[in-house]
Amino acid sequence: MTERFELAIVGAGPAGMAAALEAKARGLSAVVLDEQPRPGGQIYRRAEARDARLEAALGAEYAHGMALTEKFLAGGVAYRPNTTLWDLSPELRLSVLRDNRAGEIDAAHVILATGAMERPVPVRGWILPGAMSVGAAQILLKTTGAVPDKPAVLAGSGPLLYLLAAQYLAAGVEVRALVETQPGANYRAAAPYLLPALWQRKLLLKGAAMLRDLRKHGVKRWQGASSLAVEGNDACTALTFAVNGKRERIETELVLLHEGVIPNVHVTMAINGGHDWDATQLCWRPRLDAWGATSVDGVSVAGDGGGIWGAEAAEHTGRIAALGAAQRLGKISEEARDRAASHARASLARLRGARQFLDLLYKPAPGQRLPPDDVIVCRCEEVTAGTLREVARIGAIGLTQAKTYTRCGMGPCQGRMCGPTVAALVADERKMPEASVPPYRPRAPYKPVTIGALAAAVDADTPPPDASAGAH
């Protein structure tokens, strides 16, 4: 059976929840679809029950997120957890998978609030047991309260690196070292934006407090690191890296890697929306108007899926996208829309200065996205960086051509995890701007869907046979 709503929101993070509450207030019939069992998104993931000790370790922002999720759950919006979007047609029919059964939803407007993903940056040994991403470690902390029982080394760049370190320290975990890869040039590039960033003093003070916490606990910090490598045969035993021309080594059984986050553009790429190359964040982002509308009629984007701004900004963009949809669907006038969006726009303007400062400060170092030849880039098909460099040399100028030669990007993730690195390798090998490297074009199903799930949907929609049919 096909459900029908005026507005379908994909994603129940801060942007999706804020958009849903705004839509409800404007009289729209809305449904929120989310892959997770509970709302909150990656940033406000929550355990089955409230845990005061865990929330204390995660900080005041997480407590704000819990309040938002509870308001959302009490808001009377149709909510479909454990639901995966696997196709979005030009007619705005959403094909979904829920409880291993396929279904369909028709909408007059769609808001994609699919958030961000960690930037995949392969290093030697990154596939060893004991090496994982900072984001994955934080998911375990938020959803189950799980923390490592062994010392951790955090390596890479970006605010999440310090945040998890502070959260681990608050939870009693030993953080053996913090290995930072942002080069000194980043500090000089970001310096002119420090004054505008002072509009967000709370954010800067939070960062300063985390650094003080690291010093108080005696956490060793290495800065300007490069050529990271995880050592080990069957599992991680150490992290090695270069600093000031010298090779350093830290013994550890747990290495957590991170190089920032980028917009999750899988769906907007699949529906052939317009995208622009972000030269600061080194990623593609959807081309949006002032109300979050994409170049595809009836589809908008809210939150970090449209550009990395953080959880606070995501709520504002969610409200703005919902107001834009409400006006488009005739629920409110342009004047009422503009008036209702004024507060959110003013808040976004205050956030802009800090964002520019952070983006430049934590921009990945040029060599950090170019792994050595023997490093596996595509984990699905086990394609190495050396193989990708070779196909670039013999003529591959885009990701689809590289896929044809090597099967890189043909696994279940459809290139989400390898695409950014493949593009960087092709651009470097062919001495061309990365913005000129054609990206993967994902196709439905966006996520794996079984024949059994499709058959279950057909069975559910098929009326029972006429018992009298066999008598004629």
Image (spheres, rainbow, N blue to C red):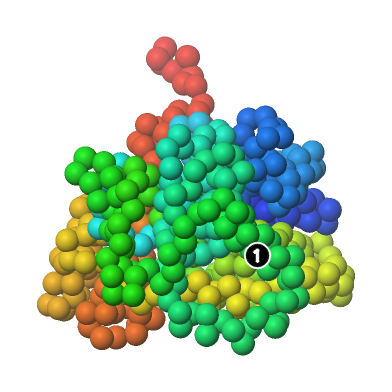
Above/below status of 265 relative to 166: below
The reply, left or right, for residue 206 in relation to residue 24 is left
Residue depicted at x 60% and y 78%: 356
Give the image quarter of residue 387: bottom left
The reply, left or right, for residue 215 in relation to residue 452 is right
Query: In front: 28, or 341?
Result: 341
Residue depicted at x 68% and y 35%: 53
The reply, left or right, for residue 302 in relation to residue 279 is right
Residue type marked 1: Ala
Q: Crowding at label 1, few (<14), some or many (≥20) Cα neighbours within 10 Å? A: few
Residue wearing tag 1: 208
Query: In front: 358, or 380?
Result: 358
Residue depicted at x 52% and y 80%: 187
Position of the C terminus, as image quadrant, is top left
Query: In front: 86, or 63?
Result: 63
Above/below status of 37 relative to 446: above
Q: Is any part of residue 275 visible from this angle? A: no
Residue depicted at x 63% and y 59%: 212
